Image: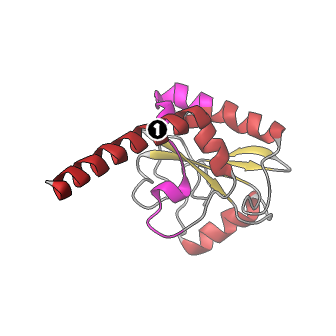
Amino acid sequence: MKPIAIIIHHEAGNNGFDSVNEYHRQKWNFKSLRGFYAGYTWFLDKRRGWIHAREEDETGAHTIGWNDKSVGICLHGDYSKEILPKNTKAILKTKVDEIRTRWNIPQTEVYGHKEKATTGTQCPGSLMDFVVEYRGGIQSLQKQVIELSKKVIELLKKLISIKNG
């Protein structure tokens, strides 16, 4: 498999890699080539640093429909309650940059789990701020909003014109 995207997750807890690895073993029992059960490719543990749980070109178990075409990165912590520290943000950005370069993944193909999930998850919590900023930041979002607003105005003008017809 050649990954075409990166999907960012959070643990939604503060138990760390060993707990996640055991939970995934019990849930799926899907052992990686590296000997772990965690469905993520990379896990940033607050105490141990980066743990490489799966090969980057190995099928993961982190996002239904994307496990065979993406690299899953999970951060230790509950980012529905925590804010990403600046130093952790820099570490995450470096890892995402490395993976993107290695696999030639476009900057626009970095997602938060909830953007690709088939369920109503809020994962990765406040890490979505990192994802949005990484893909192009606020300027990119502002440009998208402006373009959509222009399209809405044009559609409204057409509707008014049809109504007044």
Q: Position of residue 108 (x, y in %)?
A: 48, 35
- Residue ID at (86%, 50%): 47
Look at label 1 and name its amino acid.
Answer: Ile
User: Left or right: 111 with respect to 12?
Assistant: left
Q: Position of residue 93 (x, y in %)?
A: 68, 34
Q: Dot 1: few (<14), some (14–19), or many (≥20) neighbours within 10 Å?
A: few
Q: Quadrant of the N terminus?
A: top left
> Range of the magenta residues?
97-120
Task: State the residue lying farthest toward the right.
Answer: 47
User: Left or right: 122 with respect to 70?
Assistant: right
Residue 109 in the magenta stretch? The answer is yes
- Residue ID at (75%, 39%): 89
Residue 62: in sight, yes or no? no
- Residue on which the image places disc 1: 146
Q: Position of residue 131 (x, y in %)?
A: 60, 43
Q: Position of residue 105 (x, y in %)?
A: 47, 32
